[in-house]
Image (cartoon, rainbow, N blue to C red):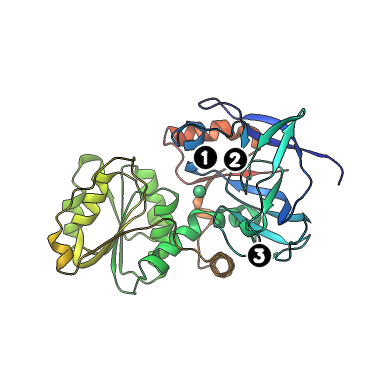
Amino acid sequence: MKMRKVKAAVLYEIDKPLVIDEVEVPDLEHGQVLVDIKCSGLCHKQLEEMTGKRGNDPHLPHLLGHEGAGIVEEVGPSVTYVKPGDHVVLGWMKGQGIDSAPPFYSKLGKPVNAGWITTFNEMAVISENRITPIRKDMPFDVAALLGCAVTTGLGVVSRIAKMEPGGKVVVFGIGGIGLNVVQSAALFGAVQVIAVDVNDDKLALAQCIGATHTVNATDGGEIDRVLELTSGEGADYCFEAVGDVRVMERAYQVTGSKGLTVLMGVPKSGDKLCVDPIPLYLGRRLTGCHGGDTVKEEDIPHCVDMYLAGKLKLDELITERIKLEEINASFERMKEKKLVGRSVIEFD
Ligand SMILES: [Zn+2]
């Protein structure tokens, strides 16, 4: 294969803007796939990596991005799940296929690291098991969203909570995953979906994709408001998507006597949760989850079908569409909490 050079947003230093650079793409090895990336979403996880919230980073410099969509350009040895020309969703979760070694890109002979998936580069070498083929009539911008938050939200509702229709639902924290828990709860026939956040724009977006009620928690009165809305009984399903133990305690407090509290946000390490355990003996349940136990081969094509049938709202989740060169400004807005929905990179 001739040496390819592609444009990429590279993290060279923590707490510094990404550098739009040209990197050399390595030859494909066992289980690797070269994908022409069409669109990529920006996720909060990358902001955490860029700002060092995830700790010391021994892999610098490296590429980033873990949700996207594109077209398979070439496949490496032993790849059988996809073939050149396939339209694919790219996501960080493992699915069918080979778990390959991560690729090593380079810049002027120096290594530029990458994980099993990166999407802030025009073309990417991706592990076969991070790729899911989809229908060709699915637009790439909305397909990119299926790599992370949408499928996680759906999985949390269907596979973790095993939600039954007719329930009352509360979602604390209307970020990428919270929004999709709202939407999935509505799709699963919840009679009441209460969205709680401190940002009115996010609450308005939640309402547009399925929330029946919204509560702004800025004044600290959210427990009373939720109890009032649920006739004093609390909700059947309460989801915490903030990653703050104090919010987790509130979610538990407004869960009904036979209800389920699901903790999705990841708290700071060392933080302790303080709850009254007595309701647990009487039927209330409390659980955590890492992702939504997504089965990509089933859930991603299912989301595509639902979107194309007009049932799943994805366009509404995209707040801005940017060029790769505008990526730092978008992360800046995310940092300042001015980004309401998803920012999506559209590659030329
Ligand atoms: Zn993500």
Classify 10 Å Cα crowding around label 3: few (below 14), some (14-19), many (20 and above).
Answer: some
Residue 134's mark? 3
The residue singled out by tag 2 in the image is: 64
The answer to whether marks 1 and 2 mark residues whose Cβ atoms lie closer than 8 Å is yes
Binning the other alpha carbons within 10 Å of mark 1 as few (below 14), some (14 to 19) or many (20 upward) gives some
The residue drawn where x is 44% and y is 43% is 340
Residue at label 1? 46
SS of the residue at dot 3? strand
**Left or right: where 312 falls relative to 98:** left
Residue 107 seen: yes
Image location (x, y in percent) of residue 104: 70, 40
Is the C-beta of the residue carrying label 3 under 8 Å from the nearest atom of ligand 1? Answer: no
Of the pair 228 and 42, the residue shown nearer to us: 42
Q: How many marks?
A: 3
Answer left or right for 259 relative to 320.
Answer: left
Between the C-alphas of marks 1 and 3, the distance is 25 Å
| 170 relative position to 30: left or right | left
Q: Is mark 1 within 8 Å of ligand 1?
A: yes
**Position of 339 relative to 276 (above/below):** above
- Which callout, 1 or 3, points to the residue nearer the camera? 1
Query: Residue 232: in sight, yes or no?
Result: no
Tell which circle, 3 or 2, labels the residue nearer the N-terminal end: 2
Judge whether 289 appears above or below 304 on screen. Answer: above
Mark with earlier residue (1, 3): 1
Calculate the distance from the C-alpha at mark 3 to the C-alpha at mark 2: 23 Å
What's the amino acid at mark 3? Ile
Sequence order check, earlier mark of 1 and 2: 1
